[in-house]
Amino acid sequence: MHTLESKGLKKGAISRSTAVMIGLAATAPAYSLSGALGYGAAESGYQLPIIFILSVIPMFFVALSYKHLTTSSPDSGTVFTWGAKALGPRFGWLGGWAMFLASILAGVTATQVIVNMMVVLLDLEQMPQWLNFVVAVVFIFSTTYLAVLGAKESSQATILLTLFQFSGLAILASVLFFYILQNDVISTAESFSWTWFDPFSIPSPDIFLNGFLIALFIFWGFDASLAMSEEIKGNSEQAGRSGVIAILITVVIYVVLATLALAYAGIDPKDPLSLTFSSNIDSSVTVLVTDVIGSHGAKWAALIIAISAFSATMSTIMPAARIVLAMASYRAIPIQFAKIDPTTCTPKLATWTIGSMTLVIYVILSLVSEAIIKDAIHSVSIAVCTYYTIASLSCANYFYHTALRHWRTTLSQVIFPILGAITLMVIGTIQAWRMFDPHYGASGSIGGIGAVFLLGVATLLFGFFVMLLCNLHEATFFRGKTLPKESASLDFSTHHSNKS
């Protein structure tokens, strides 16, 4: 892509393997699985493994879009930059806003996860309000501070936390596998069967859809490292592969742990040790760890989940700050956010702004109701569907002139991204319709409309108001001058190939 500019970020600060780790950390396997296993098993039963596999297909198509766009344009603005170049400035701006919004809401829910895990670790009956806020301030300040230190330093912290998290999950998987081999499992659990991986064994379309909705969004986050592509060692094509690798590793982890959990604990809602028992469904990982380790299992699980939330928050703050940096650099928002700290080579103002907004929103929502914070993770789905759809359509629209020369590039750069975008639009619409129901979620309704719907849709629509203000303040970007619309051409493709 033409007319792109360097933003002062430090090239080579992140290795390619570290980039993959950032993508893995952002998906937060430990605390994602803690919620997804129970609810997924309740919706899909023993077909959960195959539904995990099927649900990753549209996300893989999105990952391909990210790969091709990063190869063409390793820009920290990712969906904002690509959307503006391929679809127009307003699509790009909306994609950037949706990604920023998803990161903020994810940080809010991660903060509540940390607070809940501290209750377990400190043996408290209930977290006092003052301690709740202290934990939130310490958590958000520390994650933001580490993100400000520098790409290399913050990524090193992410690696250590991610390795600890994955070590805990690997130990849990090994212990479950040993018990299953010894046939020392919950009595109501069914024996492993290959039909769990048979898509034709899914009982009904409704069961498939319900499980698909749960599974689809636990894969979100693989793209975190691609916003740091300007800082990754190697060429742009190597940087683009990190997202694809991250999502493939993630699906293997989810499928393996889901299969072992089902074979060990089963799905009998009447059995107090099963995944779908009423008091287990919210924290299936904690139940599994406690059952196989003993009385201290709950604390070990709480520690792993807390670390998962911590590393995930760091891994979403860093790309969100770089989205803000890119939007400011191309005059889509006030240029003050384009400042780079000369010592750390990081967007310090943008990063601290994101941390501060996360804390303020968390405090406001926690004063209203903890149920709203719990439902915020559901509202993230609308923002995620929005910016992933824009990224996929940007890929198809940008490359269609050159991609049609060969069937492989036609599939990879046009057809698969369009299929991914259509799937996400359909799933996002269905999810939004469900959230509109006043009985959806734990936070009730406002004016007969589900509060979780309002949280997700109202905040996304608020972006149009912010866009209007930015347009009035600085119209250069919206006139297509800083990021003029373009598509890949045969001449540019040949020149780029020769140059490489």
Image (tube, rainbow, N blue to C red):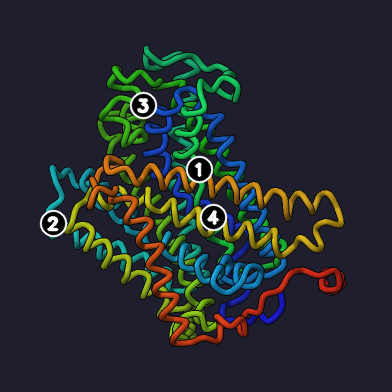
Q: Residue at x 54, y 76 (%)?
A: 326
**Residue bearing the label numbered 1:** 216
Between 292 and 454, the residue placed more toward the observer is 454
Report crowding for label 3: few under 14, some 14 to 19, many 20 or more residues within 10 A (C-alpha). Answer: many
Q: Amino acid at mark 1?
A: Leu
Give the label, 3 or 1, closer to the camera.
1
Residue sitting at x 45%, y 35%:
171
To which residue does mark 4 refer? Answer: 23
As measured in the structure, the alpha-carbon distance from the residue carrying label 3 to the one carrying label 4 is: 28 Å
Q: Who comes first in sequence, dot 2 or dot 1?
A: 2
Amino acid identity at mark 4: Gly
Residue at 49 percent of width and 34 percent of height: 209
Q: Quadrant of residue 124?
A: top left
Spatial CA distance of label 3 from label 2 is: 31 Å
Q: Nearer the viewer, mark 4 or mark 1?
A: 1
Say what amino acid the circle numbered 3 marks.
Answer: Leu
N-terminal of the two: label 3 or label 2? Answer: 2
Look at the numbered disc 4 and give the secondary structure of its residue. helix
**In whole angstroms, how far apart are the C-alphas of marks 4 and 1?**
16 Å
* Few, some or many residues within 10 Å of mark 2 (<14, 14–19, 20+): few
Relative depth, front residue between 417 and 28: 417
Q: Which residue is mark 2?
A: 129
Are the residues at dot 2 and dot 4 in contact (C-beta closer than 8 Å)? Answer: no
In the image, which is nearer the foreground, mark 2 or mark 1?
Answer: 1
Around disc 4, counting alpha carbons within 10 Å, would you say few (fewer than 14), some (14 to 19), or many (20 or more)? many
Tag 3 near tag 1, CB within 8 Å = no
Question: Mark 3 or mark 1: which comes first in sequence?
Answer: 1
| Residue matched to label 3 | 275
